Each structure stands twice: as C-alpha cells, then as structure tokens.
Amino acid sequence: MRKLKTGDEVIVIAGKSKGDRGKITKLVGDNRVLVEGVNLIKKHVKPNPNANEQGGILERESALDISNVAIVNGDKADRVGIKVTDDGERVRYFKSSGELIDA
C-alpha cells in the first residue's frame, strides 16, 4: 500500500515550489507525482496539422519526487503511517494525531 494516493491534498516541502499546495493528479513510476498547479514548466511545442494542434509555448506541470511532498492535515504537513486493523485491513493514518485518512 502506498502512503500517498491520487486525490490526496499535499504541500510541497522542498524545491522551487516550496509551500505550494494542490491535489495529486497522477503517480508517475514508483517515486514521482504530478501535483495540480505546482512545479509548472514552459514547454515549446511544434504545430501538428494532422492532429489539428497549434504550436507555441505551453505551461504544464512537471513531476515532483514523492519525498518532496507531504500530505496536509488541517493546514500543516504531516507524515503517513500504515497499520493493520483487527479484521486484517491495511489503513493509512496521520502520524501526529493517529486519526484515519481514508475513513
């Protein structure tokens, strides 16, 4: 079970986008994530008339390392733990408060 999932609200804790918040839109590989509206780059794109695409400079999100983001608990960054319930189900919880994330 992963500690961070798609749709989690996260805050960037390191890098040029430090302090920015957003939702995880995609998990890329084992240890990279795309966060909505964070780590924006400018991409130069050639026009493609066959696909009816216009060229130019596009601004898009780039992947961040998963170690540079932390889940948001209230308004602060927090760590995630995984524990097994009595019925054998694995659940995620906030390390600081102990409350469940998914429930």
Image (tube, rainbow, N blue to C red):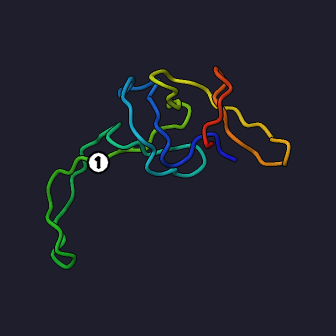
Classify mark 1: residues with Cα within 10 Å, few (<14), some (14-19) or many (20+).
few
Q: Viewer-proximal residue, 100 or 24?
A: 100
Three-letter code for the amino acid on which mark 1 is drawn: Arg
Identify which residue is drawn at 19% across, 79% down: 50
Q: Relative to residue 53, is residue 89 drawn left or right?
A: right
Q: Viewer-proximal residue, 68 or 81?
A: 81
57 w.r.t. 92: above or below? below
Identify which residue is drawn at 29% across, 48% down: 60
The residue tagged 1 is: 60
Quarter of the image for the C terminus: give it.
Answer: top right
Residue 18 spot, x, y in % from top left: 39, 24
Residue 99 spot, x, y in % from top left: 65, 29
Residue 95 spot, x, y in % from top left: 66, 24
Identify which residue is drawn at 65% across, 35% down: 100
Residue 32 spot, x, y in % from top left: 52, 44
Callout 1: SS: strand
